[in-house]
């Protein structure tokens, strides 16, 4: 069955370390939620009510771990497709004894469409999504009007969406797409300073030392 949208990722074999595979085998059932085409009860998923932040594409989980540790009062639902990233995040959850993180290993568009009820998310994090730099691949970029419209419908009034990228062209596309969603308003004039809760990654620090830019955007759902 073909997806009804262009996927922003390619199913490619990614190398997994022994530790990542062991974490997948041991902890996937403990901390992950299986995709299913029915609405997810977030309170039941985490065991208690709290503001829930959705993160799309958490990579190896470094940033997710640090934010979840700094914000124990919030719940974080991470969506990632690649085994290596899920295994790495499971290792981090166990090592840091995190109880406020749950994972779904599936396509984020289908998770949003089928599992997240309207007006239930308190925030959305999308950090350094694949920039697909070649022009012919721009259609694969995650940040497109249909996704942002879907995301906005799942955000509660006052909820925020925070995107970050180190590709200037993609940053301006993100700004255009987010600004074009009528239910969202920009919290800044254009791009935002990096908020304290988003830590600098090693990759980002390295880029900044080389003079590369990083662009943050924070929009809020109109109430």
Image (cartoon, rainbow, N blue to C red):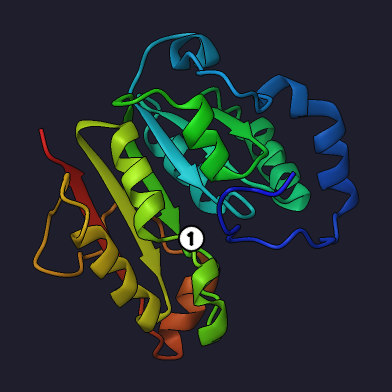
Residue 7: where, in percent of width, then height? 60, 57
Above or below for 212 versus 93: below
Residue 182: where, in percent of width, then height? 15, 50
Where residue 95 sits, quadrant-wise, is: top right
Q: Nearer the viewer, residue 214 or 201?
A: 214
Q: Nearer the viewer, residue 57 or 148?
A: 148
Is 131 on the left or on the right of 180, as rendered?
Answer: right
What residue sits right under mark 1 in the picture? 142
Would residue 77 be seen by someone viewing this image from the given angle? no
Above or below for 203 versus 26: below
| Quadrant of the rendering where the N terminus is positioned | top right
Q: Nearer the viewer, residue 34 or 60?
A: 34
Q: Which residue is rendered at x = 54% and y = 15% of the image?
A: 45
Above or below for 122 versus 127: above
**Disc 1 element:** loop
Q: Which residue is rendered at x = 25% and y = 59% of the image?
A: 178
Is 139 on the left or on the right of 107, as rendered?
Answer: left
Q: Identify the residue at the far bottom of this view.
A: 210
């Amino acid at each position: 069955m073909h997806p009804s949208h262009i996927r922003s990722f390619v199913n490619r074999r990614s190398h997994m370390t022994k530790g990542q595979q062991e974490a997948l085998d041991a902890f996937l059932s403990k901390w992950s939620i299986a995709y299913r085409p029915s609405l997810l009860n977030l309170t039941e998923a985490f065991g208690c009510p709290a503001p829930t932040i959705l993160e799309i594409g958490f990579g190896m989980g470094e940033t997710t771990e640090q934010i979840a540790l700094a914000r124990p009062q919030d719940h974080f639902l991470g969506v990632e497709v690649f085994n290596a990233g899920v295994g790495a995040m499971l290792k981090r959850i166990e090592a840091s004894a995190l109880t406020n993180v749950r994972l779904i290993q599936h396509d984020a568009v289908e998770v949003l469409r089928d599992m997240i009820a309207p007006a239930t998310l308190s925030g959305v994090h999308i950090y350094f999504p694949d920039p697909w730099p070649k022009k012919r691949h721009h259609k694969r970029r995650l940040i497109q009007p249909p996704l942002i419209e879907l995301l906005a419908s799942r955000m509660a009034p006052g909820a925020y969406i925070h995107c970050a990228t180190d590709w200037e062209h993609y940053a301006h596309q993100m700004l255009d797409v987010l600004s074009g969603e009528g239910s969202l308003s920009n919290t800044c004039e254009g791009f935002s300073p990096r908020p304290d809760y988003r830590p600098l990654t090693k990759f980002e620090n390295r880029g900044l030392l080389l003079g590369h830019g990083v662009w943050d955007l924070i929009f809020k759902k109109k109430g």
